[in-house]
Amino acid sequence: MISFLRGVVAEALPQCLVLDVNGVGYEVIVPLSTFDSINPVVGQTVTLKTHLHIRENMQLLYGFASDAERDIFRLLIERVSGIGPATAISLLSGLNVNAFKSAVVNGDVRAIARAKGVGKKTAERIVLELKDKVGLAATWEAQQQGTTSQAAADAELALVALGFKQADARKAISTLLRDNPQAGTDELIRGALRHMS
């Protein structure tokens, strides 16, 4: 799996970049939020977090400016029924990570439905499945209220996106935070993976 790419921008279109990585041109589909965040210019060196999506007849590489964007993308395509990569990219193009989390926490179906290709029923399903089935909305709400740290919320999201149960991820992170309240996201993820193995 390709986890990230660091290369020189060879082409820059609003939802597609071509990165020259040591003489190999990688075409990477990006949401508008990533494009706006990195503001790519031909000749500039950029780093993208990536997700390789393999279908029967093609392989598509998706790129993101941050781990949080990639985690939301993975969460959508793996945990919400009927959401594919194109819809997930469209959602991230219309809403940045914080706006998306806020829309799910507040049940703001209209904000989610504004994304291209996302109707009211799909937006309702996203809120329902992320809020009730996956339960991440409670973590995001705690983060907004300041009762959980950004690092803990990001680590929990990453672990859920990797396929772990939220309850197990939250328990492992809580245990780690008792020993080291200042632990960063990467440290929490690594520790939780060791703890849950």
Image: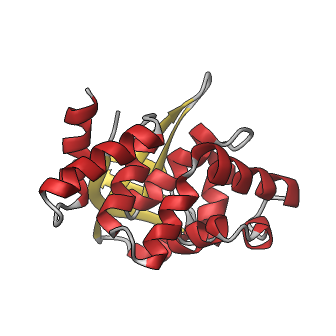
Q: Which image quarter: residue 183?
A: bottom left
- The residue at 80%/72% (across/down) is 110
Relative to 1, say whether 11 is above or below: below
Q: Quadrant of residue 18?
A: bottom left
Q: How is the image coloured?
A: secondary structure
Tell me the residue at 69%/52% (across/down): 87
Q: Nearer the viewer, residue 18 or 126?
A: 126
- At x 57% / y 63%, what residue is drawn? 15
Q: Position of residue 169 (x, y in %)?
A: 37, 43
Q: Position of residue 24 (x, y in %)?
A: 31, 44
Q: Between residues 27 and 35, which one lies in front from this camera angle? A: 35
Quadrant of the frame with the N terminus: top left
At which x and y percent is residue 52? 45, 38
Farthest top residue in view: 56
Asked if residue 90 is positioned above or below residue 58 in the image, the reply reads below
Q: Is residue 21 visible?
A: no
**Left or right: 110 as drawn, with respect to 46:** right
Could you tell me which residue is drawn at 47 percent across and 78 percent down? 145
Q: Quadrant for residue 41, please give it.
A: bottom left
